[in-house]
Image (cartoon, coloured by chain):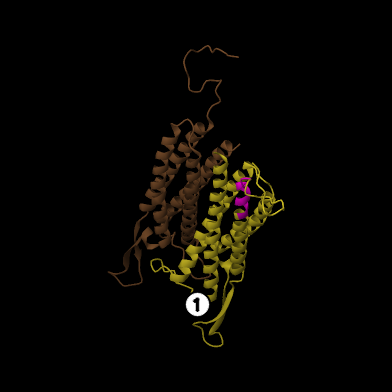
Chain colours: A yellow, B brown
Amino acid sequence: MTTTTSSGKTMPESGYVPPSPPRNLFAVDLALRLLLLASTVSALVVLATSKQTKTLPTNSLPPFSFATRSAYFKDSPALIYLLVALSVGVLYSILTILASCFAITRPSPSPKLYFLLIVYDALMAGILASATGTAGSVAYLGLKGNSHVGWAKICNVYGKFCRHVGSSTIVTLVASILLVLLVILSSYSLYRRSH
Amino acid sequence: MTTTTSSGKTMPESGYVPPSPPRNLFAVDLALRLLLLASTVSALVVLATSKQTKTLPTNSLPPFSFATRSAYFKDSPALIYLLVALSVGVLYSILTILASCFAITRPSPSPKLYFLLIVYDALMAGILASATGTAGSVAYLGLKGNSHVGWAKICNVYGKFCRHVGSSTIVTLVASILLVLLVILSSYSLYRRSH
């Protein structure tokens, strides 16, 4: 039994051919990876531009009663780790966007690609999640201090610096969540194929 | 063409039946989960017993020239987060050990179980990795301090406390790596089934 369609054009996904599921999911994969690139690049830029220089009063007599002090991410090993993790994240998202573009054109991507993507996405998610924790911990100490060990808060002085570090940390958290979603997406694709 | 074996017994995995691969891999899965339970429990115990009380000299006159001070994980939100994450990790590993024991008896576990394990393992890996970063950042500050913002190191005073927190952080890192290995293992099992 044949059916003629009103449209004479040959469409790649007409109603009578079951749509190839991996292809559709790689469109979602590509969208998530583009979001990942956007989030890592923006977090990296916000962190790199966080330098704040302030002229603060000191206890000395004039003309030494003011001193120029800077807050910069290089002063904290935790923020250097965040910067390195974000740089790796940017490179990784560019590479996997290329892999995703390559796979989106195929009618049925290989299971090996899904497996490799799960492995590397899980590793990157771990790296970015630990960087989120590391920087978030320092940012919280900057915001609140810790009276038990006498660590004074610094965000009342370096407001712009703290806003940049805090925003960068939150966007890195979003990037880690995107990577966990990508792991779930790839494993769901493998799951559908394994029936 | 039939072949008779020298052994008359009916063995579940004789040489002429291909061995069921998911069953073998769930033995590895169970071993990794037992390691995960051991690491999270030990990290939790080490962190919970990290309290250190010291009698320190003060600047006051006698009889107030000494004061008793304590270092305890509850003084730091980062270490409270580590404790909560480790508690969730202990519960999670107990639950998934039960699931793994259930699956190890089956000749062929369902792909859905692998998919669910990947999803929850990836989430737990993210939680434990971020807790590692959070606590590691505070432990590093305790060890080295930060001269730029005037945060003094405390590990020269509270040595036992720092050793406990540091050990707990390192064991949590091991637990996160175990969870990433579990993600890789489950996705490899799905990959083998999807050929």
Q: Is residue B96 above or below residue A146?
A: above
x and y percent of residue B14 in the render? 52, 20
- Which residue: 55% across, 57% down? A178
Q: Is residue B18 left or right of residue B87?
A: right
- Which residue: 36% across, 52% down? B48
Camera sees residue B72: no
x and y percent of residue B102 in the render? 41, 35
Q: Does the magenta portion include A25?
A: yes
Give the labeled residue for mark 1: A157
Q: Quadrant of the C terminus of chain B?
A: top right
Q: Nearer the viewer, residue B179 or B19?
A: B19
Q: Which residues are magenta?
A: A17-27
Q: Quadrant of residue B18?
A: top right
- Which residue: 50% across, 77% down? A157
Q: Is residue B162 above or below residue B190?
A: below
x and y percent of residue A101 in the render? 68, 53
x and y percent of residue B126 in the render? 50, 53
Q: Is residue B93 left or right of residue B67?
A: right
Number of numbered discs visible in the structure rendering: 1
